Image (cartoon, coloured by chain):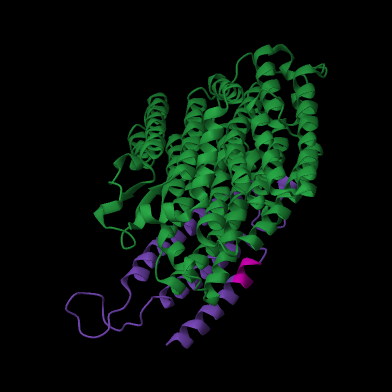
Chain colours: A purple, B green
Amino acid sequence: MNAIFAIVTGILFGLGVYLLLRRDLVKTAMGYYVLFTAINLFFLAVGVFDGEAAPYVGEQGQPSDPLVQALLLTAIVISFGTYALLLGMINVASRRFGTIDSDDVDHLRR
Amino acid sequence: MSMNNAVILGPIFFPLAGVIICLLLARSNRIQRYAGLAAMIAAWLCSLAVLTAVFDQGVQVYRVGGYSPPYGIALAVDLLNGLFGVMAATVMTAGALYVVGSKDKCANYPAFMPLMLGMATGLAGAFYTGDIFTLFVFVEVMVMSSVGLTAISDNKLGLEAAIKYLLISAMGSLFLLLGIGAIYASFGTLNLADIARALETGERPLLAQVAALMLMCAFLLKSAVFPFHFWQPDFHTTSPTAVSAMLSSVVVKVGVYGLIRLTTLLFIPESQLLRLALLALGIIGVFFGGLGAFRTHDAKRMLAYSTFGQIGFILVGIGWGTPLALAAAIIYAMNHAFIKSALLMLTGAVASRLTSKSAALAQLQGVGVEMKGVSLLYFIGGLALSGVPPLNGFISKLALVQGGIGAESWIALGLAVGGGILTLMYMMRTWQYVFQAEPEAEVNFRPYGDSLIAPAILIGLCVVLGVYATPLVSAAQMAAAQLGDPNVYITAVLGG
């Protein structure tokens, strides 16, 4: 199970970095989101015990770690909020500057 | 074991409640601004009460929901974050006061004051929490609020800076989260005190070492230290004046706070190596900031570059790591927050007289000739930043030099003092340009601008802290002594 987690996290991380380095700002934002998903998967995998059952009292078998799942929910909400804010700002930027190419959105450097 | 002290919640709760109240009052901008100011004053009083309690009774802990740590989330305040919390609340209250008298167009938006208060919430929470994941959440609250505030700035390019900063800061948060995950995988806990106790045993899984580096990179990014600095001048100069004064003074201190905790509470055996890196980065920052400030043509941008230099001084203090040097770093961090926020507010107040609101030196030249009061305040602030007695900047430089002598790190000491001279040169150059030079042919400026109450109070505070420096200095020394024994913090949070 851990091997699958490791491979999938690795693939997502690679994809995320690739997208993040695109010049298109929308793709950059998507890359950020994919990267965050990779981290979320990593978080799911680092639970302190390998459980199969839901973490309720009275469930049979080794329970899974409820803390990482709670953290994960928080992290998902935060990443989603950041992603929405980023896309919203890129939307305004596309109208204000007339482009979403990150090489052209560099008025501050001129 | 100390009792639950609910006052610790105050500096987090009041701004958060203020966000909601201000949103309900969105119809009347005037009332909204005063409500925000009232919330910040309440938070400021609470932060003072917390600090007093820490002085009288030792480390204060609040267990959220009554669950005892390490299972529940705890807010834990020792002298270090007590002092930082007071610093943040003081400067944020001054910021809210500045917003009340601000003529910026964006300050009329119904979202402006709530976002300011959101920033204060995140800041206080990040300082007070004793749980590393909660730290991440509060830092995100702070980042999102400041990004929103910069994106709606009167300066059209604020949006570009906000996008850049959000992307870079998101990378920082990713690494922070990865570091937190690595720590959780190694020790199965997120409570700072519990992690410190686990690390004390000398157990070092590979992931924990990786976590140390990731956390350090994340904190360096939040403080805009040399290899992670490039976003800062853009972001700090395009934001509205009240916001840039907060960003450049207290928001960058979150990283400083994290670095102090990292080297004195968590990774103590590794701190030799971390400190060496911080010392090198600090000295680079002092010179990079000083020289960068020289070649800017914008009064606000110059102050943003100057922040690199000042953070550099603080890092040098943390890098030496002796109790004296740590105390110096704390004094420096607090004094810098007051001086830098006052100077940025003054610059913004002068720029607000121009129709363009630009702080470019070419446009500001001679605008301040008629403004004797602002000129005097800016002059005092400039002297304080460069460390001229009897102002508070001198006290911080003096403390740092004492720390350097104690650490017997002569080369670093020489470099740090040399870097200080640069500050005086660029501050006075700008002062002459804005307040002394003859105005260029036709300068159109309005007879009114932003209110000067907030920066005047902050400059007054700088003078008071310079003349009557003993309380802050002794408090910082006590804080540094407390940091010398991490068990004080650990037992206060976890008990016996």
Residue located at (41% from left, 51% from top): B129
Helix, strand or loop: magenta stretch: helix
B234 and B128: which one is in front? Answer: B128
User: Visible in this render: residue A83?
Assistant: yes
Query: Residue B289's image quarter?
Result: top right
B204 and B449: which one is in front? Answer: B204
- As drawn, the residue found furthest toward the left would be A58
Residue located at (58% from left, 35% from top): B337
User: Considering only vertical position in the picture, is B112 above or below B370?
Assistant: below
User: In the rendered picture of this protein, how many numbered marks are placed on residues?
Assistant: 0
Task: Name the quadrant of the N terminus of chain A.
Answer: bottom left
> What x and y, as percent, mark residue B77?
41, 46
Is residue B52 on the magenta stretch? no
User: Considering only vertical position in the picture, is B14 above or below B184?
Assistant: above
- Describe residue A53's horizontal placement relative to residue B165 as left or right: left
- Describe residue B26's horizontal placement relative to residue A105 as left or right: left
User: Visible in this render: residue A110?
Assistant: no
Task: Name the quadrant of the C terminus of chain A.
Answer: top right
- Describe residue B306's horizontal placement relative to residue B137 as left or right: right
Is residue A20 on the magenta stretch? yes
Segment tinted magenta in the rendering: A17-21
Residue located at (44% from left, 70% from top): B184
Residue located at (68% from left, 14% from top): B371
User: Considering only vertical position in the picture, is A62 above or below B354?
Assistant: below
> What x and y, as percent, mark residue B254?
54, 48
